[in-house]
Amino acid sequence: MATRVKTPYPGVYYREAQRIGGKGTEKVFYVVFKKDGKVHEEKVGRQYADDMTAARAALIRGERIEGKRLSRKEIREREKAQKEAQAKRWTLDRLWENYKAGRKPGMSLYIDEGRYKKYIKPIFGEKEPKELLLLDVDRLKFRLLKKLSPQSVKHVLSLLERITNFGASRNLCDPLPFKIKKPQVNNIKTEDLTPEQLASLLKAINKDSNIQAANMMRMALFTGMRRGELFKLKWNDIDFHRGFIHIRDPKGGPNQTIPLNDAAREVLSSHPKTDSDFVFPGQNGRQRVTVNKAVNRIKKRAGLPEDFRPLHGLRHVYASMLASSGQVDLYTLQKLLTHKDPRMTTRYTHLRDDALKRASNVAGNIVQDIVNQKKEDQEASNE
């Protein structure tokens, strides 16, 4: 063991030791003091690694004697205890990772992960649900409402709610001590196109060079499939023989089956196949995550309204055409749109009712024609 060397400061000495992170040696300082009837000898730091000097060591010795400072051993034990306590804490970050692991990969999870990292993690990531305050959540809501739509803010707060409910339901943490108040959303938006607009859109689709985007828009119009469902669609989901399309995990619900109508069959039969399992593959044959640039280009070329959503809007056009035809009841329309809640389909009720009124008027018109004809015959006989 190296020789102990005294310093000018009482109870402070050092030993020479191999320098850490450099060549040669450095001084390792120790202090000796008496406390509670016991003599203590403690290492306080290295000359270079800890920037320690005899004077600093003397100050540390004084603080140890007065009980104002913990020993290095006590500090290590405290840090260890803190790490162990932290490991047992079910923070939002830790809950999110476990919640995410149980979700199916796909666009929905991709979007939720973006929401979590951007809006929830920076504020609540290191907190446990029981540490959240209603005031803090309300502040987040009002701040987001300044730059996001009420629907987008509702999605963020719903994700926060789902994560905390996930932890509470598995006894990992206490539930939130309050109910999150989400913004009111007027979500009943039914997009439609006039016959002229639809003709212009079809012309723009036919002229576009991006066959993937063009055929996705055709499929949305001919089948009413959602954007995410088109992204997830695989060739083995299409039953050309029996005439059905299998929709996997539609908006988080059970798998559904919709008819493969003649128009959709024609699109898919001529659609180019690649080595990918996906009908509309993304980069390197993986599941597609976006098509915004191409479909917005087509929308712009067709001269459609700025707020018309190229894929979801065509789903509304599909539903509106069926409802206004008077030939499709709302129950059938619900099944074709794979709505879990029939209330979602009722937005098209007025279109169905208008069609029924037109059909009902046919009978009245026939009777009126007969009455008019009889009047004409009567007038002719009187002449």
Image (spheres, rainbow, N blue to C red):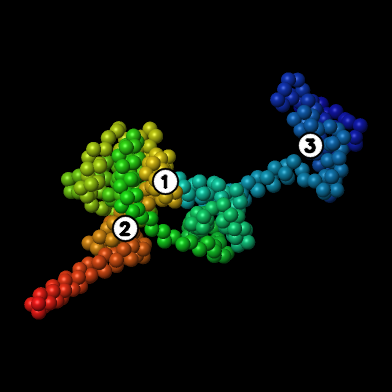
Q: Residues within 10 Å of mark 2 (few under 14, many from 20)?
A: many
Query: Looking at the image, which residue sits at the far top?
Result: 23
Q: Residues within 10 Å of mark 1 (few under 14, many from 20)?
A: some
Q: CA distance from mark 3 to mark 2?
A: 79 Å
Nearer to us of marks 3 and 2 is 2
Question: What x and y, as percent, mark residue 172?
Answer: 52, 56
Q: Which residue is mark 2?
A: 320
Residue for point 74% across, 25% down: 19
Tell me the element at label 3: strand
**Along the line of sight, which residue is nearer the eye, 193 or 36?**
193
Kind of residue sitting beneath label 3: Val
Q: Is residue 326 above or below residue 288?
A: below
Kind of residue sitting beneath label 2: Ser
Question: What x and y, as percent, mark residue 337?
Answer: 31, 56
Residue for point 83% across, 45% down: 64
Q: Which residue is mark 1?
A: 107
Tell me the element at label 1: helix
Say whether disc 2 or disc 1 marks the residue closer to the N-terminus. Answer: 1
Circles 1 and 3: CB atoms closer than 8 Å: no
Determine which of the numbered discs, if any, sits on residue 117 in the image.
Answer: none
Q: Which residue is mark 3?
A: 44
Say whether disc 3 or disc 2 marks the residue closer to the N-terminus. Answer: 3
